[in-house]
Image (cartoon, helix red, strand yellow):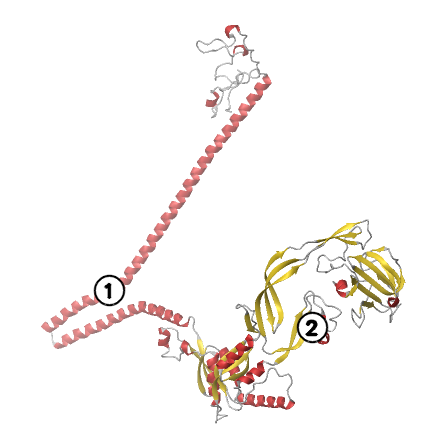
Amino acid sequence: MAPYDKMPDDSVPEPDDSPLGELAEAEPEEAAPSGELEELAAPAGEPSPPAGEAASGTEDGAEPPGEAEDGAEPPPAQRAESPFVRSVKRLWFRAANAFYAYCYFVGIQLLRTTRAKRRHVAHGFHRMEEEAAARRRKYFNRLRARLRGYWRDLVSPLTELREQCRGFSKAVDNARRYGTSRNVANVVLNAAGFWLKRLWRIFRTLLNYAAPIAACVLLYFTVRYFVGFQLALHVEYNGVDIGYVSNETVFTEAEKDMKERMILGDVLVADPTAEEEDTNEVQEAEQAAEEAEEQAKTIRPRFELTPVTRDPFSRFMGRFVHTADPSQLLDADELTNRLIRAVSRSENNPDGFAVEEATGLYIDGTYIGAVTDGDGLLDLLYEMKERYRTSDMEESTSIQFVKKVEVKQGLYPSGPNGSIRSLEEIRSLLDKEERGKKIYTVVSGDDPLKIAAKNGITLDELKAMNPGVDVSLFPGDELLIANSVPYLGVKVTETIRYEEELEYEITQRTDPDHDIGYYQIVQQGEKGVREVTAEIVMTDGVETDRNILNTTIVKEPVNQIVVVGGNRPLKVIPKDSSGRVASGAFQWPTIAGSINPGFLGYWGHTGSDISWSGCYGSPVLASADGTVVASGWRGLYGYCVVIDHGGGMQSLYAHCSALYVSAGQQVSQGETIAAIGATGNAYGPHLHFEIRVNGTPVDAAPYLYG
């Protein structure tokens, strides 16, 4: 709404010179609602008409609004505004005028300030451009003056010489024409002296410029020569020039390889699979090693640092210093052969010894021996790997040696004391076994008898290497199944496909109308089937790793639904058809102690005996919730308690000294049911604890420790 500067009251002062003064003369086009307000304002300088005459003014030819057409009743007259309303409007219009004037002033000032700042910034940039242009002109003038000075320094001696040449030419002509020969000689000598001085001046000027340039060029080529500068070692061994190596590590490796093949004629190639050696043989080997070490002390390698040439400039420098070409650098194998040649011509062994080109066999970096038939050695190694290939293996099956096997061609000492062996000797050596451990990792469903059968050993051998395996055995445990392994083991990596069963889940429904231990199958479960693609790793015929690559469900399992008594599900019922009971389903049935002996600890022992010093009379605790089905004397068991936990699971507590529960009574896990004693067939106080599945005793240790 547009502000107004005057209300329809004569007492309102005239409008000031504010920007709204012009707007105050405009009359609003919209009329106030009928019966509430009159016209809001009248034209400036005219009094407002009375309320009854507000609508008397009409256009030409129009009837007054107070008279009805065709005898109709006139409309009711509008009600006059109250003084309060007019005062409020007057205040509102004044406030609006003041706010508008303030905004107008602020806007004008903002525009002025912005324009002033813009002019200042533009002036500052313009001044910076002028200063930069002045600096450029100044530096350009200085550079131009300096270049002109350099040019004058270079040209002025030549100009002066040219002028002097003309003067000397005239002087010589005058001396010849008017003087004697002596005068001519003096003029020539003066000219020669002047020329020498001026030439020296020119040379000195040129030297001032040429010397820095020459220094920069020399620095460039020097840096280029030494950047990436590589040094090599020139090797002399046993007085023989061997060649060049990149570093001392190459020589050390080659010398070690040489000493493995032979040590100054005394071959030290031992059988790495030998478990026992005769004392005399050990002493002889030690004595030979000491003698070889003493002989080795007489041979000292001599090294000389030599730069390696890289480019034509370096080769040019090589005319003045001793350099090596990169193609002359020897690797460890070639250096080994040259060292053997050098040692074979040792002064300590003037007759020398025979060396022969052969193929050496190295296993895990250890020299085993050499054969002259290199192809036969490769065929032997291939044959040893192919022993593990079966007809049903895919072409992608990988067969590799467990250890790193290398063959190297080179020079090896031959003769009776040489290290060259026959192919059959190498074969018999590789077929032997060496000391070492072979570990088996227990998987689900394993028992000691199965593990022994899997690994080709007897149960007694398994127990001897793993004491207590019949007492405690869990998936993931590592068992020692061999104290020796093949010297050259073979690892087979194969991708296989097979089907395996999927366990079904067991869902419990509680029925409080029945006692704890009640168990009824409502829906039988069915196992599913899935196809598995796996990568297995077999080491010497024993599976050591299995990686599942893909699984495909062939048949979905059908869950089993059972009804159990009580108000809560039974912990002792397995979660699925695998029969594995959840951890904590059975708790330790006493307040202390340990198992000794365990399940099948001796012939006919079907339980786990728990005892400790002073255990007589200690409480026996219910291992899980259930209903007591037997409590009393049971022959060899003495006083015992049998609790039914449902799902075919029962627990038995025998040799008790006192019983605190009776048949038919429901007990909770951890409740005291008896006291430890020595009744029945017992030798000393202990608790004979059994867990029975469908009436058959099983090992209780996995349930208690699981």
> In the visual, does 196 lie left or right of 526?
left
Depth check: give the residue in front, 573 or 521: 521
Dot 1: few (<14), some (14–19), or many (≥20) neighbours within 10 Å? Answer: few
Q: Residue drawn at (52%, 8%), measured in percent from left and top?
A: 66
Depth check: give the residue in front, 561 or 285: 561
Dot 2: few (<14), some (14–19), or many (≥20) neighbours within 10 Å? Answer: some
N-terminal label among 1 and 2:
1
Q: Identify the amino acid type marked 1.
A: Ser
Depth check: give the residue in front, 348 or 705: 705
Depth check: give the residue in front, 238 or 264: 264
Quick one: SS at disc 2? Answer: helix
Residue 156 is marked as 1
Does residue 590 appear anywhere in the picture?
no
Up the image or down, 702 lies above or below 555; here it is below
Q: Residue drawn at (58%, 19%), measured in percent from left and top?
A: 85
Does residue 631 appear anywhere in the picture?
yes
| Quarter occupied by the C terminus | bottom right
Quick one: SS at disc 1? Answer: helix
Up the image or down, 607 lies above or below 566; here it is below
> In the visual, does 366 lie left or right of 302?
right
Q: Identify the amino acid type marked 2.
A: Ala
Q: Residue drawn at (53%, 24%), measured in percent from left and top?
A: 94
Q: Which residue is mark 2?
A: 452
Question: Which x, y percent locates residue 639?
Answer: 88, 64
Figure label count:
2
| Residue 636, quarter of picture | bottom right
Question: Which x, y percent locates residue 219?
Answer: 38, 70
> In the visual, does 686 lie left or right of 105?
right
